Amino acid sequence: MTDAVSTIDVAVFGAGRIGKIHAANLARQPGVRLKYVVDVNREAAAALAAQHGAQVADIDGAIGDASIGATVICSSTDTHADLIVKSAAQNKHVFCEKPVDLTMERARMCAEAVERAGVVCMIGFQRRFDPTFAALKARLDAGEIGTPEMLVVTSRDPGAPPVDYIRRSGGIFKDMLIHDFDICRWILDDEADTLHATGSCLTDPAIADAGDIDSTAVTIRTKRGRLCQINTTRRAAYGYDQRFEVLGSTGMLQAGNIRPTEVTAYSETKVSTDVPEAFFLERYRAAYALEIAHFFDAVTHGKPVRTTVADGLKALELAEAATRSWREGRAVKLGEAA
Amino acid sequence: MTDAVSTIDVAVFGAGRIGKIHAANLARQPGVRLKYVVDVNREAAAALAAQHGAQVADIDGAIGDASIGATVICSSTDTHADLIVKSAAQNKHVFCEKPVDLTMERARMCAEAVERAGVVCMIGFQRRFDPTFAALKARLDAGEIGTPEMLVVTSRDPGAPPVDYIRRSGGIFKDMLIHDFDICRWILDDEADTLHATGSCLTDPAIADAGDIDSTAVTIRTKRGRLCQINTTRRAAYGYDQRFEVLGSTGMLQAGNIRPTEVTAYSETKVSTDVPEAFFLERYRAAYALEIAHFFDAVTHGKPVRTTVADGLKALELAEAATRSWREGRAVKLGEAA
Amino acid sequence: MTDAVSTIDVAVFGAGRIGKIHAANLARQPGVRLKYVVDVNREAAAALAAQHGAQVADIDGAIGDASIGATVICSSTDTHADLIVKSAAQNKHVFCEKPVDLTMERARMCAEAVERAGVVCMIGFQRRFDPTFAALKARLDAGEIGTPEMLVVTSRDPGAPPVDYIRRSGGIFKDMLIHDFDICRWILDDEADTLHATGSCLTDPAIADAGDIDSTAVTIRTKRGRLCQINTTRRAAYGYDQRFEVLGSTGMLQAGNIRPTEVTAYSETKVSTDVPEAFFLERYRAAYALEIAHFFDAVTHGKPVRTTVADGLKALELAEAATRSWREGRAVKLGEAA
Amino acid sequence: MTDAVSTIDVAVFGAGRIGKIHAANLARQPGVRLKYVVDVNREAAAALAAQHGAQVADIDGAIGDASIGATVICSSTDTHADLIVKSAAQNKHVFCEKPVDLTMERARMCAEAVERAGVVCMIGFQRRFDPTFAALKARLDAGEIGTPEMLVVTSRDPGAPPVDYIRRSGGIFKDMLIHDFDICRWILDDEADTLHATGSCLTDPAIADAGDIDSTAVTIRTKRGRLCQINTTRRAAYGYDQRFEVLGSTGMLQAGNIRPTEVTAYSETKVSTDVPEAFFLERYRAAYALEIAHFFDAVTHGKPVRTTVADGLKALELAEAATRSWREGRAVKLGEAA
């Protein structure tokens, strides 16, 4: 582990919630040094930089510094594509939060830039690194339940974000289900052939006014005939619900929620346990740490990353298909002329 | 309960698996007497009759006997309609296993015959009587989780029936999902607006050769925008899997499987419990007893039944829509010209 | 099963709660006929007799009837010994509720009477017939967890009986833990060497005034050094709690409670399931049916019973030792001069 | 949190398993600096020191350094007393692993030294800081289940340490149950009145040859009549088992094990989950971090610690009473002349 005489210097873009997580995690990697924090909010950038002995920089200053080996992009979605392209042009390895972009066109441009530069580009589908999900996948790959046949994904947020956010989010399929589409491809180990999506606005009429929905039901049939159903809501009163189960030819594997504590209480009328971890920062705490470690391990040792920009494109493609299916009220075939 | 000086005499049609269950259950009802067993297999009829001190009869003999107050129809699906119509014509109350018939036309004919005669006609959607499902429904109706928004139904058989059976079954949607469609209407308390069904043949190519599938993924959107996803398979290696969960505006209710025992075993590598009850006869043992008690209670006291012939028609309508959706690869609107 | 041309006629003593259970269960056995119900409360006897087409009799009339093949003793504890001795003297097989008697002397007299007559005498330790407990025992015997080393028994009633009952009960160890002592011997497959019991009166001072306690902690060390801990209370606010777990050299087996339904509810603050079945009539419903079937199967086919009068004596011996240990505040050795 | 201009310098004694844990955790505390690592094994000391930018020192060098504010004692048990006394004499705050010492006499001497010096002395009963245990305790204190009445502690190691270790360990009650005795006092919020301990050597005869046992069953009755049963083994084949449950007057609270993942697998014969976390380093990872944070918070802000040297004495007293009870085969009264 400590053969590394060299240290990799990193610039983080975005000093918000997820930027703070990644900054703290990468600061803990041996051989990795957080050099710059970049944020349009200079105060936020300064606070995060101070916490880790880093400096504030602007985009060009950070990417233009030849000593920077990698960028970690956690800024708002509309900045992703530019930062990826710029980073690649300067030969920096890139870790970028999902989604790559809200349009396929720009996302493809990113893929090409990364390809051309020959840099590592990892997309932050952190769920693949969740210990429970990863263990399930490893057991599936080891053949424990035979061939996967059906996947049921339950993916529910504890509450809707502000309508302002929703308006700029690209819609629920790109903003929220992008993760679930990645899970589908990853677990069923196959590409979508047809997709049907429907949904409703059930929690807040303001979401409908913004042209979006808050509850969705998606079905994907893969090229090999495997089936996936995804159910989501922006508002699960009991918290953040992140489960999936995969039926195989010889058994089933379920990935359950994680509870803050293992206390069970018996009252006169019920036996109760904790509700699941509150939201993604808590639920995926370990996953965030593991994905960053994976990224720097890949960068340092020239190994491939598990969640590539191609995975980002595929998930986005499914999100676009879902949006179309929902809007047009029909099943769509992947690859059909849009 | 024992005000009844009068006893109701009953004829059972069908001495197979489910006929035996119903015969045993009705024989235990106070004020109910099993008088006739009818089956094309006279030997089976004789054996069942002997067990309960009843007699063997043929259809007309049984229905023609003025002392018979009710018929219990557990014979093969293609006989249901005739027996319902004949029973109604002779003023007998009817309990009939699902489905009413494989065609909407004949099913409607049954509904009319029953209506005309003014007799009770209950369809055997026994799941509504399962103590777990019924308790969930009661708590939902009591407002425990607010308004229902999404329903996920997992309904998996432990193994496919013989292909011969499948060929005559009307297809998986009418044969197997008919129960799940009833659950959907019952739990979401709303009628379907659109439906999308897809599926695959993943377990045995002979099923595809018979023009059917063994794995399905159905989505229903109701008139009020509530969402339901149903996933089914003919072959779950771990047994009979019968769960559903309903998300409401203020919480969630899940109905889980039942285990034969509550033994938990800790080995060096895992902590394990029993797989679920093996199949429907075991899983719904209590439900079968309760539905028959409900039927005779309704008949005796002139009360409405909980699962009417209208419910049978509605479930069949959904099964037809699902078949069409699957065959045509598109979402369908309920009530559209077929 | 129906080779039996002969029918066995039975007299039931005691028309209370448990008498009703046994009467209903034995009435369902093929080849068994409830002929007499005996109770000092003639009205209760008449009601129960009527329900099963039996007659009311007095003790001598019932036992004196040569056609009676077996007696089922569910009357109050102080009548058990007399009824066992009388039944045996008239060559009737005997099923008797626990305990055999409150004194070792009279219990031994019963054992001798039964031995002399060569009749079957089964003691109602119904827990051994509970499907969960029996499955655990079978798996233990099959070597699933190696050699048993430690047993933890949790045995809690939902509420104390009236103090009047407690006063005549022989004390908590004879009245309540007698079942747990039987479980200990059955599961650890060894006899007690030393025993320590302590306890407190924590729920109702009236119990202390009656010279008893309501909460106990018992430890048994067997001849082979296996360990058993039993914890009991008369009052578990959440209901009837009947669990045990056995640690073996290669694993552990736990027997859990049974819930009325498998509904799980998610609210904003907790995930909850049902409390356990309310009390012994519900919790051991299946066990009661199975033990009666076992008794008549043994009687009819000349097979040994699983819970003999010797088991009754052994459990009573432990209850006496526990009482002494608690009263004298010291560990006692089984078999020491009392 | 960062008002602290001052930094507290720390010396860690012991560079073994637990020393490494504490060193890493304290290095993460803001305002805390690991200055010295002391170990008879200089190589181990050097490695640990290097990892955290600290220096190697000997005992007197470390304690004699006026800049050192606190010592963290993780060396072998026989060194604890000396190091506590020396630290206190030099006015250092002390965090010391359990047990304080193997003899009451020397443990009391430590308590006096600490008292005299007026320094903070915290004993490493890390279980009180486990999030599950701490949440249970908080809910108990909040009155959720009324008054505590009974406690059942299951405390099982995955395998016995080398016999050499056992020989020097002070016996199972001082080495292993010391934690459980602390749990008993903490949860039942009362002091022991009488104690009974028994046990066996069931896993390895070499343990008996060393004069010790590997399986114990302890019962404690408190001054207010509350009951506690503890069952332990050195060898649970399925791993590290750390549970307890407390019955209160109006309910029950259970603290369960933690699993590495939340995967559930359904095979043809069983439904299984992970065995518990492997051993104490994994199981109490969070607890170790929280207790060190608590210690430095107390030291920095002059707050009392939750697990004092007095708690260490009390637990040791129970361990001695248990040893005596087991050796003499009798219940003992706490405070009786030894």
Image (cartoon, coloured by chain):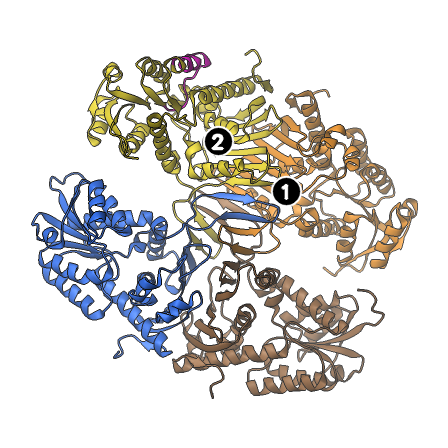
Chain colours: A blue, B brown, C orange, D yellow
Q: Nearer the viewer, mark 1 or mark 2?
A: 1
Label 2 residue SS = strand
Instruction: Determine the secondary structure under disc 1.
Output: loop
Amino acid type, residue under disc 1 in the picture: Ala
Residue A17 left/right relative to C204: left
Q: Which residue is mark 2?
A: D233
Residue D292 is one of the magenta-drawn residues: no
Nearest the eye: C271 or D244: C271
Residue with the mark numbered 1: C237
The amino acid sitting under disc 2 is Thr
Q: Residue at x 33, y 21 (%)?
A: D93
Would you place residue C249 above or below residue A292 in this image? above
- What range is drawn magenta here? D96-113
**Mark 2 closeness class: few <14, some 14–19, many ≥20 residues within 10 Å:** many
- Residue D206 occupies quadrant: top left
The quadrant of the picture occupied by the C terminus of chain C is top right
Give the left or right position of residue C14, taking residue A136 as reference. right
Pointer 1 and pointer 2 on the same chain: no
Rendered location of residue B84, percent (x, y): 67, 82
Q: Residue at x 47, y 86 (%)?
A: B336
User: Could you tell me which quadrant the N terminus of chain C lies in?
Assistant: bottom right
Chain to which the residue tagged by mark 1 belongs = C
Q: Residue at x 39, y 58 (%)?
A: A157
Q: Mark yes or no: residue C136 visible.
A: yes
- Dot 1: few (<14), some (14–19), or many (≥20) neighbours within 10 Å? many
Reply yes or no: does residue D104 show up in magenta.
Answer: yes
Residue A223 visible in the current orientation: no
Q: Nearer the viewer, residue D128 or B66?
A: D128
Residue D83 image position (x, y, % from top left): 33, 16
